[in-house]
Amino acid sequence: MKMKKKFLYSLQAFAEAVQGKRIVYLFRIASEASTTAGKRIPFVTEDSRTKSKDADSTATKDGSIRTPGTAEVEISTTLILSKGDEIVKKLEDAMDNDQLIEIWEANLDEPGSTYSSNKFKGMYFQGYITEFEQTASAEEHVEISLTFGINGSGKRGEVTVSAEEQEEANYLFKDSVQEE
């Protein structure tokens, strides 16, 4: 038993933490699937995914029994509004019109199993925007907060993140030479 613990601790010494900027979300209105790819929203400051599950309790002579309910998933994103942002406008209109939204979560630190440099391990979700908040204080940038109520619990798979989307997420180094 002590050997297993020692081995476990030594493996953890080599583990690296995932930085928040390496988890990216892509969004698309489901009805636009034939004409539009999922896109990142610029200037995101924070994303979150929450799973919660209620449980009913039944009293018995031997103590209570817990019966888990159905898991509920919410995805939230907070961003600084960029001038001329069309994605946020489309998402706000989608909320008003009860349109289904597709969401992809990709971890840019975990390449997919295929040999494509644009595939990453991630998850796919469908849901509706349940909250849209715009905050415009006198001394700060305009901030938008979006909350998505997810249908089901999402599916694991490989997410395609274009080189352009990766570049925007990473701020990759570019040389000063003219691009072809």
Image (cartoon, grey):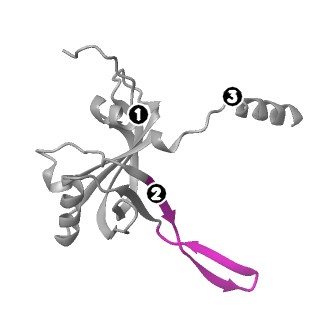
Residue marked by disc 1: 170
Residue marked by disc 2: 49
Q: Are marks 1 and 3 in contact (CB under 8 Å)?
A: no
Judge whether 135 appears above or below 39 on screen. Answer: below
- Of the pair 45 and 137, the residue shown nearer to us: 137
The percent coordinates of residue 155 (x first, y second) are 39, 49
What residue type is disc 2 on?
Answer: Arg
The percent coordinates of residue 85 (x first, y second) are 22, 53
For residue 134: magenta? Answer: no
Decide: few, some or many residues near mark 1? Use Cα within 10 Å; few <14, some 14-19, many ≥20. few
For residue 56: magenta? Answer: yes
Which residue occupies 23% across, 60% down? Answer: 91
- Of the pair 115 and 18, the residue shown nearer to us: 18
Residue marked by disc 3: 14
The percent coordinates of residue 115 (x first, y second) are 36, 20
Q: Are marks 3 and 2 in contact (CB under 8 Å)?
A: no
Q: Which residues are magenta?
A: 46-70
Report, in whole angstroms, how far the alpha carbon at label 1 lies from the one at label 2.
Answer: 21 Å
Of the numbered discs 1 and 3, the one sitting upstream in the chain is 3
Report, in whole angstroms, how far the alpha carbon at label 1 lies from the one at label 3.
Answer: 23 Å
What residue type is disc 1 on?
Answer: Asn
Judge whether 34 appears above or below 162 on screen. Answer: below
The percent coordinates of residue 70 (x first, y second) are 46, 69
User: Secondary structure of the magenta portion, mostly?
Assistant: strand
Side of 41 where 122 appears, left or right = right
Report, in whole angstroms, how far the alpha carbon at label 3 lies from the one at label 2.
Answer: 26 Å
